[in-house]
Image (cartoon, rainbow, N blue to C red):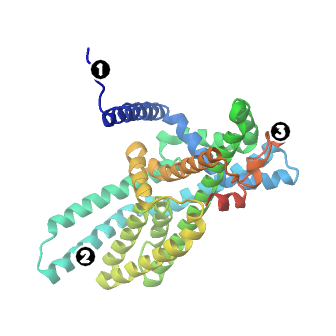
Amino acid sequence: MSDWRPPRWLEVSTGWSWRLLVIVAAVAVAGTALTALSSVVLPLLIGLILTSVLAPISTKLLARGWKPGLAAFAGLFVLLVFVALFVWLLLAALVGPWSTISDQIGAGIDVLVGEFNDRFDGDLTQVSDDIRSGAAKIVQVLLGGVIGMVGIAVGLVTTLFLTLTVVFFYLKDGPMMWAWFLGHTPGHRDLVDRVGRAMWDKLNAFVRGTAAVAFVDAIGIALGAWILGVPSVLAIGVFTFTLSFIPFFGAFFAGAIAVAIALADGGVNRGLLMLLVVLIVQQVESNLLQPVLVGRAVRLHPLVVALGVIAGGSIGGVLGMFLSIPLIAAATAAVTEVRRSSSGSDTSIDGPIDTPIDAVPASGAVEPPDSSGAAALA
């Protein structure tokens, strides 16, 4: 028999190929399992994100001597008040006058297309019909997703109830759950502890920063619309705040809706002024607010963000678009911490990250991430 061996490049490429196939298969199996268990997985993920925002409230109440259960209920009460306020805004801004808003958007598109036809002697009638149809479908999908997330959709009432239950127990017994989990990783307890807390810190910073940016965007664009006399100001503000949680695409759709309504009400001149307001607010947000409130904590390449949003939308619809970036940010924090530990560099996060497991209380609110941790991660 001949002692033939394949070329080195073929051995290497074959080795990488079967490893890649195994990884793809594992990801596919995990994705299928998560999709099948979405009724359980989604409340756990949404509850984790909400808890990262509410944890400081319970922590401060615990420091004042409140019982863990009562402190957790206080945090949950704040969440319920916010949800009730948001539902009220949706009902007042969108559900009632939705047909009027939809007509305004369509009329704004017609004004823009008509102006183009007059100035350039073209015919974009078919394009106008396609844009109107596509815009109506996109806005209806987004509206349906937003309403579903706050529990108005009957089919998601169970998910909403389970999410609130998860938030309560995260707030009440979060440290005890984390201590129990670490107790089952004795060989790598310190590394797992640092990785988990780094992910928590990154998630907290992202959610708070994004919420602050979304609020400023909504106030700025809605105020500009009010000054220009554009109708449906409350709807514009609600759209802008909600869609700002979807990077890139959300800001584009929110601005387009505001400009279309301005075009329908005041013609091209008012539409251009509204466009100028949107561009100014978004430039201030992207160049000043984002780097300070979000950029230091979440350093993701724009291509990663765009692909993450698209992938999240393909897997979980509108809700997947909302969840994709915070989950990717948490995953990058985990990878960064593992690399730091494997390199042997002493760059562990200060504060709660170095707290020994024996010092973690058996019950109480989930500890909020230390601000120095976000700076270290950045």
* Residue 292 spot, x, y in % from top left: 59, 70
Res. 3 mark? 1
* Residue 250 spot, x, y in % from top left: 42, 62
Res. 358 mark? 3
Measure how far apart labels 2 and 1 are at the Cα level: 74 Å
Question: Which residue is found at the position 29% from the left and 20% from the top?
Answer: 3
* Residue 65 spot, x, y in % from top left: 88, 50
**Numbered disc total:** 3
Element assignment for label 1: loop
In the visual, does 240 lie left or right of 59? left
Quarter of the image that includes the N terminus: top left
Query: How would you rate the neighbour count of disc 2 (Cα within 10 Å): few for under 14, some for 14-19, many for 20 or more?
Result: some
- Residue furthest toward the right? 65
Q: Earlier in the sequence, mark 2 or mark 1?
A: 1
In the visual, does 52 lie left or right of 116? right
In the visual, does 374 lie left or right of 130? right
Quarter of the image that includes the C terminus: bottom right
* Residue 28 spot, x, y in % from top left: 41, 33
Label 2 with label 1: CB-CB less than 8 Å: no
Q: Disc 2 marks which residue?
A: 112
Q: Quadrant of residue 178?
A: top right
Q: Is residue 289 above or below residue 347?
A: below
Measure how far apart labels 3 and 2 are at the Cα level: 65 Å
In the visual, does 52 lie left or right of 289? right
Q: Give the number of the mark in front: 3 or 2.
A: 3
- Which one is in front, 323 or 336? 336
Question: Which residue is found at the position 61% from the left and 54% from the top?
Answer: 202
Q: Give the number of the mark in front: 2 or 1.
A: 1
Element assignment for label 3: helix
Instruction: Please state which amino acid type lies under the numbered disc 3.
Output: Asp
- Residue furthest toward the top? 1
- Which one is in front, 190 or 260? 190
